[in-house]
Amino acid sequence: MLRFLISILLAGLVLGQNAIACEQDCVDTNQWQIGVAIGAGVRTNPLVDGDNIPLVILPDIAWYGEHFYLDNDELGYQLKNDADWALEGFVNINKEAANFTFWHPANLLTNLSMSSGFIGPAAEVKRTVSKDEVATRHWSVNGGVRMHWRHDNGELAASVATDVSGVHNGQQVELNYSFSTNLGSWRWSITPGLIWKSAKLVDYYYGLDGRDGVDTFLYYEGRSGWYPSLALQLARPLAENWLLLGSMSWTKLHKGMTGSPLLEDRNIRGLFVGVAYQF
């Protein structure tokens, strides 16, 4: 089904979970799969002076062989793949730097700008610093393994990855469960998840020290921790190769990240409504 709803609308607009070659709603082996979703949406940026990421054009490119595969920003090798479970090794681009750099691969081709934030009761004033006033946070590349356990309309996935580019030498773990079913002419999927990021990874992107040239009272050391995510996707066929798509996502960052003066929001929200076409 259109690369499983454009690879779950490019991983719920927030964090990556790639499709895998399997028997239903997935990619045919030894064939290129190219699709694009066009619509209106936004992913919020939790950084001080961070621009929200407009979502207008979401491309999707994949090729799966018997073992090797390319799925958007991920290259991998499937060690095992059957109806009940699968195991793969992979390398992909860590998406953490996307909040610091608009022209990051995770921030796909877009041209719509939307305002951020919600007005609420006054809160304690927090010392902050703009992302534009600190040292550059570089892209990094993950290398890891992912396992899938499948049953009926659900799939549990667990992955462990480490920085193979030597940028921060940190690690991350992702656990998520996806459930998909049909309700009338609509196909819907819900994906709750948990993410753990190591202290080295968090400190590299959200910590502050002498490298940043800021006052010492702004220094901050990032800490490891778990945080939750949730994504909901809806799709309805419109015509041959065409789908109507909708997606909402939410991520609540953990205290080891949100204590940083670089962050002004502990939540990341995503929203997209549009149409998708597979070539």
Image (cartoon, helix red, strand yellow):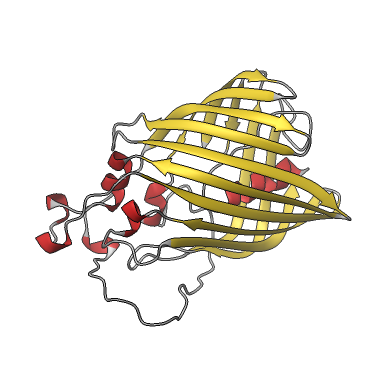
Q: Reply above or below: 244 against 143.
A: below
The residue positioned 80% from the left and 47% from the top of the image is 181
Viewer-side residue, 144 vs 51: 144
Q: Does residue 215 appear to the left or right of 111 in the view shown? A: left
Residue 35 in the image: x percent, y percent? 69, 45
Name the residue at the right extreme: 184
Q: Does residue 240 appear to the left or right of 207 in the view shown? A: right
**Which quadrant of the figure contains the N terminus?**
top right
Q: Does residue 101 appear to the left or right of 7 in the view shown? A: left
Residue 177 showing in the rendered view = yes
The residue positioned 54% from the left and 39% from the top of the image is 175
The residue positioned 28% from the left and 40% from the top of the image is 200
Residue 98 in the image: x percent, y percent? 41, 52
Q: Reply above or below: 222 against 51.
A: above
Q: Reply above or below: 210 against 198.
A: below
Residue 253 in the image: x percent, y percent? 42, 55
Residue 215 showing in the rendered view = no
Q: Quadrant of residue 56?
A: bottom right
Viewer-side residue, 115 vs 159: 159
Q: Quadrant of residue 66?
A: top right
**Which quadrant of the figure contains the C terminus?**
top right
Residue 159 in the image: x percent, y percent? 51, 32
Viewer-side residue, 237 vs 225: 225
The residue positioned 77% from the left and 39% from the top of the image is 153
Q: In this figure, what is the number of numbered marks?
A: 0
Q: Quadrant of residue 171?
A: top left
